[in-house]
Image: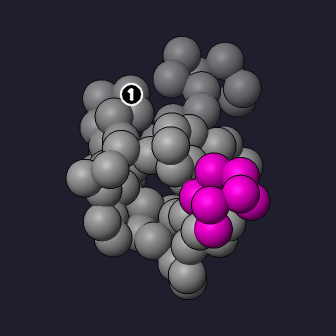
Amino acid sequence: MAIARLSGGPLDGQIIPLDAGVTDTLIMPYGEGQLIYRRQGEDQNTGAHDGPTAARFLYIEATEDIDPDPDGRDE
């Protein structure tokens, strides 16, 4: 199993399972839109006995505005 380490954006610091079919772009649902992360650098832990393969994905953009306060309570 491989894992994705997310960097930047609203999911910064999250580690998620990475499907085998994911190549350079990871698109994830978020609220009413989607978040787009792009693979950065080389994969880590690619050996047989050094843990799960880890890929770093950097936040690129969101397809919709990300509103941390949709009810307008932080005014």
Residue 45 location (% of width, % of height): 67, 66
Q: Tell whether position 49 is magenta.
A: yes
Between 74 and 11, which is closer to the camera in this rendering?
11
Q: Is residue 10 visible?
A: no
Residue at 55% across, 83% down: 41
Amino acid residing under circle 1: Gly
Residue 24 placement, left or right of 66: left
| Figure quadrant of the C terminus | top right
Q: Closest to the observer: 35 or 64?
A: 35
Instruction: Tell me which corner region of the image, top left, top right, bottom left or bottom right, holds residue 5.
Output: bottom right
10 Å crowding of disc 1: few (<14), some (14-19), many (20+)? few
| Residue 28: % across, % down | 36, 41
Height in image: 71 above or below 60?
above
**Residue at 52% from the left image edge and 49% from the top image edge:** 2
Left or right of residue 61, residue 15 in this image:
right
User: Total number of numbered labels?
Assistant: 1
Residue 44 appears in the figure: yes
In the rendered view, would you say 45 is above or below 67? below
Q: State left or right for residue 31 relative to residue 32.
A: right
Residue 61 appears left or right of 51: left
* Residue 14: quadrant of the picture: top right
Dot 1: what SS? loop
Where does the image place residue 46, in percent across and percent down from the top left?
59, 68
**Magenta stretch in the rendered image:** 47-53
Q: Nearer the viewer, residue 10 or 39?
A: 39
Please, what is the dominant secondary structure of the magenta stretch? loop
Between 10 and 43, the residue placed more toward the observer is: 43
Tag 1 residue: 31
Residue drawn 54% across and 16% down?
A: 71
Q: Residue at x 71, y 57 (%)?
A: 49
Where residue 9 appears, as percent x and y from the top left, is: 58, 54
Please tell me whether residue 70 belongs to the stretch shown in magenta. no
